[in-house]
Amino acid sequence: MEFRDLKKQYQVLKAEIDEGVLAAMASGAYILGKPVQELEEKLAAYAGRKHCVAVANGTDALQLSLMAYDVGPGDAVFTSDFTYFASAGSASIIGATPVLVDIDPATFNISPEDLEKKIQAVLAEGKLTPKFIVPVDLFGLPADFTRILPIAAKYGLKVLEDGAQGFGGAINGKRACSFGDISTTSFFPAKPLGCYGDGGAIFTDDDEIDARLRSLRAQGKSPADKYDNREIGMNSRLDTLQAAVLLPKLRAFEAYEVEAVNKVADTYTAALKDKVVTPTIPEGFYSSWAQYTLMLDSKETRDRVQKALKAKGIPTMVYYPRGLHQQAAYAWMNLSDEAFPHTTKATQCVLSLPMHPYMEPDEQKYIIDSLLEVL
């Protein structure tokens, strides 16, 4: 059994993917070929943004977005404590200071209440300039932008939506990667929309930011001459081959995959909601289900359940076993678990079940029956 069955997805889409990849190889245009431009246009249209800039990976997408707004030393970037390291590391690598924020225990997304407290604390201390909020669309569910955006406006901060896991989700019909001043996603293979390697994208409605991003992803080159470098940038371009893979996968994603994973999630929730804490989807929100994550009552229970399911051939994952405040790279911050109670509890109790749009009913029934038996 696969945790996310990419092999089965490939078999379903094989003819289209193979045709696109072979055409890209025959073209000889392996960097920024026509499929990349076509993909950027289709992604922008899907997300409801004016521009999309395809880059080498989701981490670069975050870093380039901050660079495009001149974020650097002395600037504070607020992000969730319960997320993949890149959400904060992308600020650190350009000299800015990440300020970690606890999560809402129901959704696992950044807590608007704690966010405002952290902004006020940074302002009171006076050492850093609050510059950006980076909300993460964790597990496929968009962050609560209905509350985050007014907070950003109140304190004059920009918002960078980290939609690496949230692509395909929505709030009141407005799709993920359309919120805030700028947004990003990742095409890591296990993401809701994944390629066959690394890849990422940046979304913006600002013409000047779009132009600057296209320069920054190519070593800061001028629009007319690739050997005329105007500023320090990066080498971060999506390969043509990956774009050729993503185009048919995007068609399937939009046509039926997001709907299919929501049906899988509904089946899980209906069967398990009376036995364990199942995911919370607030009214008006729609998830793309990067993961289906349960909350168990303790680390001991999680370890026991995970071991028992593994013995039955069922893979599970822990996203994430530690908060960012517990990472060795941020030990210098001297942050305590007590300051992040909801993150700390989540790291001890979360467990993600197999989740993908090609899951067969009998396969899911086996997972559910096995879990209920173990519990």
Image (cartoon, rainbow, N blue to C red):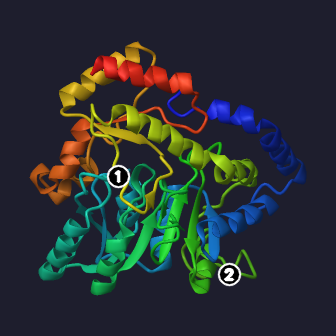
Of 100 and 64, the residue lying toward us: 100
Residue highlighted by disc 1: 83
On screen, 338 above or below 216? Answer: above
- Mark yes or no: residue 64 visible: no
- The first of marks 1 and 2 along the sequence is 1
* Residue shown at 52% from the left, 71% from the top: 178
Q: For the point 38% across and 60% down, which residue is it?
A: 283
Q: Residues within 10 Å of mark 1 (few under 14, many from 20)?
A: many
216 or 43, which is in the foreground? 43
Camera-side residue of 6 and 239: 6
Of the pair 235 and 318, the residue shown nearer to us = 318
Q: Specify the amino acid type for callout 1.
A: Thr
Residue 282, located in which quarter of the rendered image? bottom left
Q: Nearer the viewer, mark 1 or mark 2?
A: 1
Which residue is at 22% across, 53% downward?
325
Look at label 2 and name its amino acid: Ser
Q: CA distance from mark 1 to mark 2?
A: 35 Å
Residue position for label 2: 222
Q: Position of residue 298 (x, y in %)?
A: 18, 32
- Horizontal placement of 52 versus 103: left or right? right
- View extreme (right): residue: 26
Query: Are circles 1 and 2 on residues that touch, CB within 8 Å?
Result: no
Indicate whether 340 appears above or below 374.
below
Position of 141 with respect to 184 (left or right) is left
**How many numbered marks are there?**
2
For residue 290, say whether it is visible.
yes
SS at mark 1 in the image = loop
Label 2, secondary structure: give it: loop
Q: Is residue 117 above or below residue 192?
A: below
Residue drawn at x 73%, y 53% is 247
